[in-house]
Image: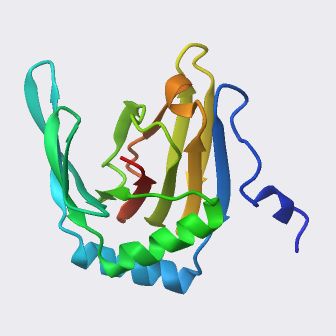
Amino acid sequence: MDLFSHLIKGDENYLPKDGIVNYFGPVLSVQKADFYFQELQKKIAWQNDQYFIAGKNITTNRQIAWYGDEKFSLNYSGSNKKGLIWINELLELKKVVEDKTKESFNSCLLNLYHTGEDGLGWHSDSEKGAVASLSLGATRKFVFKHKITKEKVEFTLSQGDLLVMKGDTQQHWLHRVPPTKKVKSPRINITFRNI
């Protein structure tokens, strides 16, 4: 146990107000995180994300996939998305996340960022309950911004890191993955949710 290990238990709230964000640090060994990263790149039914802005259909370089307890359909970013049944690797990661967070989840959204130039703009998630974010692959920044005060809280999420948003976080804070030209390798982010 080192001097700072007490800071990475997941029970500290990293937001100054109006929400709860718990950071657990890495919850997978480097070997396991590498294994899941490789397997998900191959086995997930990746599709380019599409959304509507100002009446225009935009297709991103970033790819996504939805998985859950059963096949489902939902409206997300202005377009209809199909959910697929869990694969074994996602069920294994879901168990790790549920054991750490003491939350339960029925679905997940996966994002594949091919390089640092793939990002995600400011947004809030629509789910009312906890959203657990597991990072695999390249290290990327993850930033929160308060909707009224514009105060920012920034994380650097690395291979196997787990972060959980809950409470009133989505009502009061936006979050994003800013693009960067410094990162050349891919990242997979898995957000476990209840829909």
Q: Give the left or right position of residue 94, taking residue 24 as reference.
A: left
Relative depth, front residue between 143 and 77? 77
Tell me: residue 180, above or below residue 54: below
**Residue 136 sits in quarter:** bottom left
Tell me: residue 189, above or below residue 37: above
**Residue 6 sits in quarter:** bottom right
Q: Quadrant of the N terminus?
A: bottom right
The picture places residue 141, in percent across and down from the top left corner, at 52, 48
Which residue sits at x=24%, y=55%? 64
Question: Outermost residue, top direction?
Answer: 148
The picture places residue 123, in percent across and down from the top left corner, at 39, 31
Which residue sits at x=33%, y=58%? 110
Q: Give the left or right position of residue 102, taking residue 92 as reference.
A: right
Q: Count every numbered label the image shows and give the total.
A: 0
Question: Is residue 118 in view?
Answer: yes
The picture places residue 11, in percent across and down from the top left corner, at 75, 52
Which residue sits at x=61%, y=71%? 27
Question: Outermost residue, front direction?
Answer: 70
Tell me: residue 176, above or below residue 56: below
Which residue sits at x=44%, y=56%? 192
The picture places residue 24, in percent across and down from the top left corner, at 67, 60
Question: Is residue 139 in view?
Answer: no
